[in-house]
Image: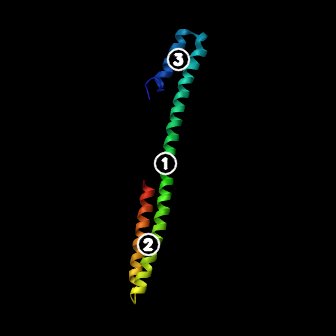
Amino acid sequence: MSLDDDLGHGDIEAALATRRELGARYDAELVDGFAERIERAVDRRVADQVAVAQRRTSGTEGSRIRQFVLGLISVGVGVPITIVPTVATDNGLPAVVIGWLGIVGVNAAHAWQSRSS
């Protein structure tokens, strides 16, 4: 952003001073020039806001995909974590509970981290 494109109180005062010096016959040119500067400033601000919105959207979409894949992997890992202690021991329930709590913890931590970024 250059200083020429930056609109401020000084720009308005300069346009009014120019109008006083040149008279009413140059009003259309002064207004057109000032309107162009305003349009450029608005276009630049809109483009900046659109870019920020696109970055947020793309980050959110990637996070959703990662969360979905992590969920699928968790279910795939959870099946052997459930079967092995159940078949290998008489009382495998504590091992199954601990294994699934670990899976839930990993998924919860990933979901929390994805929301905060």
**In the picture provided, is 6 more to the left or to the right than 30?**
left
**In the picture provided, is 50 more to the left or to the right than 86?**
right
Q: Are marks 1 and 2 in contact (CB under 8 Å)?
A: no
The image shows residue 94 at horizontal and vertical percentages of 39, 83
**Disc 3 and disc 1: Cα gap in Å?**
41 Å
**Numbered disc 2: secondary structure:** helix
Whichever of callouts 3 and 1 sits on the residue coming sooner in the sequence is 3
Whichever of callouts 3 and 2 sits on the residue coming sooner in the sequence is 3
**Disc 1 and disc 2: Cα gap in Å?**
31 Å
Q: Is residue 70 above or below residue 22?
A: below
At 51% from the left edge and 13% from the top edge, which residue is drawn? 18
Q: Is residue 46 above or below residue 94?
A: above
Label 3 environment density (alpha carbons within 10 Å; few <14, some 14–19, many ≥20): some
Q: Is residue 29 above or below residue 50?
A: above
Q: Nearer the viewer, mark 1 or mark 2?
A: 2
Q: Which mark is residue 56?
A: 1
Q: Is residue 86 above or below residue 10?
A: below
**Numbered disc 3: secondary structure:** helix
**Numbered disc 1: secondary structure:** helix
Residue at the disc numbered 3 = 16
- Relative depth, front residue between 29 and 106: 106
The image shows residue 20 at horizontal and vertical percentages of 53, 12
Number of numbered discs visible in the structure rendering: 3
Residue at the disc numbered 2 = 77
At 46% from the left edge and 71% from the top edge, which residue is drawn? 76
